[in-house]
Amino acid sequence: MKRFLVFPALALALCSTVLLAQGPTSNVNPLIGTWLQNMAKSTYSPGSPPVKEVAVRQYVAGEDGAIVAITYVMFAPEGRPLEGLPSLTAISVAKYDGKEYPQLTLAKLLTSIASHIGPEIDRTISYKAINPYSVDIVQKENGKVVSMSTRTISQDGRTLTDRYHYTNSAGEFVSNVLVFEKQL
């Protein structure tokens, strides 16, 4: 009877070894990582792109499915490599469930730390997933929508495109397309 169990045990061990050697399937969110803006592929309407500045975005997996989003600007003089310290423009921790979450600037964070009280939340951001590669984003300030955008990641996971729509302080409708490349 024991010989009868040897063959199935060997088959099970062999199959387990082959399956484990393949490794786990990848369920990594394609957004996670660092993205550098490609100024040559980005468009600004109306107006021209910022001179000597390049946006960098960093996305990190948070708890319970949340994504930590950090946006900052680096100085890039006339096509030379990035240099100096980054200038933080915004940070948020949010789930992609359509609910509003606080979006903070460096000034707001530092004021909060210096005063030892929580920051006043006057700016929020919400993300609503369209599919695994696209999300609609709404930013509000004091309860009023100030920006709407759609962020899409290419199927190969190497290009992120943000299509922003908002009205600037001069009352002009702005439609910018920001293109980012994933840094490996």
Image (cartoon, helix red, strand yellow):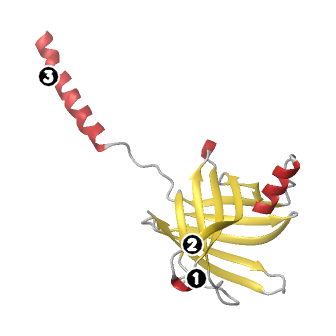
> Which residue is under mark 2?
83
Q: Secondary structure at mark 1?
A: helix
Is residue 22 in view from this perspective?
yes
Secondary element at tag 3: helix
Q: Position of residue 67 (x, y in %)?
A: 62, 52
What residue is drawn where x is 47% and y is 65%?
183
Q: Earlier in the sequence, mark 1 or mark 3?
A: 3
CA gap, disc 3 and disc 2: 63 Å
Q: Residue at x 38, y 46 (%)?
A: 25
Position of 12 with respect to 183 (left or right) is: left
Nearer the N terminus, badge 3 or badge 2? 3
The residue carrying mark 1 is 77
Callout 3 amino acid: Phe
Query: Which quadrant of the structure image shows residue 121?
Result: bottom right
Quadrant for the N terminus in the image: top left
Left or right? Give the position of 113 relative to 63.
Answer: right
x, y percent for residue 28: 47, 51
5 displayed left or right of 118: left
